[in-house]
Image (cartoon, grey):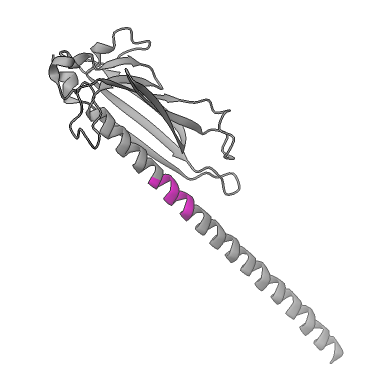
Amino acid sequence: MGNITLIDIVGSYIIAALLFMIMLKMDGNLSYANFTAINDLTVQTNIVTAARIIEEDFRKIGYCAVPANFPDPSKGITSATLHSISFVTDIPDATHPYGDGILDTISYTVGSKTTLTQTKNPNDFLLYRKVSNPTSSKTTTMSLGLTRFDFTFYNAQEDSLSFPIAVPSAIYEMRLTMLLQSPFAYDTTYSYSYWRQMRLASRNLKAR
């Protein structure tokens, strides 16, 4: 009778241990699901925000509210590399909703991976957006978790242009590829979001 009781006790401990391990596993899975859901939402929100700003800017390449101030909008892009672009436009404001006729230059460039130390992700970098005109210059940064920001540029025959691009006015269309990752990983896994706009083009670039 005593042996049966001892076996029952040992069996109860084993069952309890198994149940505890199952609960830990379930808790770990729940934590992973919650962490991943938050990270997924963050990167999705960030990539949508970045895409909207960039698309809005790029649609205005070569635009000027006073056309006489910029008679050749096909020369709207002033420089272009694999990871950067600069172009001329006329940015609207509250006083001038269609632009003031004064040409602005917008530049997008990326920073070094080693300069972004606020996150644990070793692959992300800052995106810089600089707006300048004859009287002012302002640079803003986007810390979005970017790990890729690559351009491909095309001429009027839809052939891709090789780098370095010596004649930016040859650019007719472009493609931008962005990859965002979460600032922090669960274990070693980062959430990510991928965005590629097949053709980003301002109609002003086609005014030839």
Give the residue at x 48% y 45%.
191
Which quadrant: the N terminus?
bottom right
The answer to whether residue 43 is left or right of residue 15 is: left
Up the image or down, 171 lies above or below 57; here it is: above
Determine which quarter of the picture holds residue 90.
top left
* Residue 127: x %, y % from top left: 44, 30
Give the residue at x 46% y 35%.
146
* Residue 172: x %, y % from top left: 22, 18
Which quadrant: the C terminus?
top left
Residue found farthest to the top = 166
Q: Nearer the viewer, residue 160 or 15?
A: 160
Determine which quarter of the picture holds residue 95.
top left
Residue 35 magenta? no
Q: Nearer the viewer, residue 13 or 46?
A: 46
Q: Nearer the viewer, residue 52 or 102?
A: 102
The stretch of residues the image draws in magenta is 37-45
Up the image or down, 156 lies above or below 115; here it is: above
Residue found farthest to the bottom = 1
Give the residue at x 59% y 40%.
120
Residue 156 shows up from this direction = no
The answer to whether residue 157 is left or right of residue 129 is: left
